[in-house]
Image (tube, grey):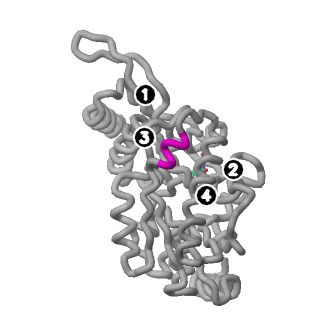
Amino acid sequence: MVDAASFVEEAVAEIRAAVGDGRAVIALSGGVDSSTAAGLAYRALGDRLVPVYVDTGLMREGETESIRETFDYMESLRVVDAADRFLDALAGVTDPEEKRAVIGEGFIREFERVAREVDADHLVQGTIYPDRIESEGNIKSHHNVGGLPDAVDFEGIVEPVRDLYKDEVREVARELGLESVVSERMPFPGPGLAVRIVGEVTREKVAVARSATTVVEDELAGLEPWQAFAAVLGKATGVKGDNRVHGWVVAVRSVESRDGMTARAQEVPWETLQRIQSRITGENPDVARVVYDVTHKPPATIEYE
Ligand code: XMP
């Protein structure tokens, strides 16, 4: 990227050319990539852009409210409550790539529905360069690239930040005047909390992952990690009063990275880890253990699935 101001100018022109005098929908996730793509597309298309936020039931705490606040100047914003549809479709699915496919398919169907309602023929996406590399290399099929169902019912897909790394996307976000809570935000995966739950996604595990992730983000924000979150791994024994119980094992992960393609597990002070542990077990009586993940990427990935 040469500089953010010229990038914005070129991207706006590219979006205008691609969409012509049609209308586009953009999938907002609350993350910096899709927010930046939305900012660019809004500049290019104004009211002919319909930003769509799909609440998949797999989002972070307070996401829906925060999206409404951040994008309240875009009058065409649509918020779709699809939590039950996604969580029902995920019942019984344990394979990580199948989860991504189910979620990818769900997303596209929701967008298509809104697109038909508002008569949009284009889809704008916040895919960035590392997403494409990892998808092409078959490391995993990111929902916003490789996991798309074959029959996508749009005339065209526009990906204005497809050649940028995350730090460049943040520069563009600042150039667009997006609030710093958005431009400096930790990345959040498209499939949401589903990739922070090992095995089947259930409402109970989602609730644990969500509440524990809020604690971890809150406690570790000061260390400025690339990403910090909690994942639900499975069950193990613990004690409650005089009884042995079988409760959730929650992993805490905090990593430093430039682009997400490699990462280092962060050194976190013991007192902070203990505070995280006591908040997570205090707020979630069904959590029996909290562990800290010390693995770099490689050999691990950042997310758990
Ligand atoms: P991994 O877990 O592959 O993550 O080391 C690298 C970066 O990509 C994010 N991630 C995803 N983003 N769809 C996305 O849009 C996905 O399926 C997905 N899986 C991982 C992850 O949060 C990290 O920033």
Instruction: Give the SS element for disc 2.
Output: loop
Kindly identify the amino acid type of the residue bearing the numbered disc 3.
Val
How far across and down, in percent of the image, does residue 39 sit?
51, 78
For image coordinates 68% across by 52% down, the residue present is 147
**Mark 2 to mark 4 CA distance (whole Å):** 17 Å
How far across and down, in percent of the image, does residue 42 sit?
52, 82
How far across and down, in percent of the image, does residue 116 sit?
58, 72
Report the residue marked by disc 3.
Answer: 206
Report the residue marked by disc 2.
Answer: 141
Report the residue marked by disc 4.
Answer: 259
Report the residue marked by disc 1.
Answer: 249
Viewer-nearest of discs 2 and 4: 2
For image coordinates 65% across by 53% down, the residue present is 142
Viewer-nearest of discs 1 and 3: 3
Circle 1: is it few (<14), some (14-19), or many (20+) Cα within 10 Å? Answer: many
Farthest residue, direction right: 137
Q: Is residue 45 magenta?
A: no
Q: Which segment is the magenta one? A: 85-90
**Mark 3 to mark 2 CA distance (whole Å):** 22 Å
**Mark 3 to mark 4 CA distance (whole Å):** 26 Å
Question: Would residue 28 be found to the left or right of residue 98 on screen?
Answer: left
Q: Quadrant of residue 24?
A: bottom right
Who is closer to the viewer here, 230 or 63? 63
Q: Are marks 1 and 4 in contact (CB under 8 Å)?
A: no
Decide: is 52 above or below 264.
below
Q: Quadrant of residue 153?
A: bottom right
**Mark 2 to mark 1 CA distance (whole Å):** 27 Å
For image coordinates 38% across by 23% down, the residue present is 247
Tell me which numbered mark, 1 or 3, is placed earlier along the sequence: 3
Decide: is 155 above or below 281.
below
Whether label 2 lies within 8 Å of ligand 1 gets the answer yes
Report the predominant secondary structure element of the magenta stretch. Answer: helix
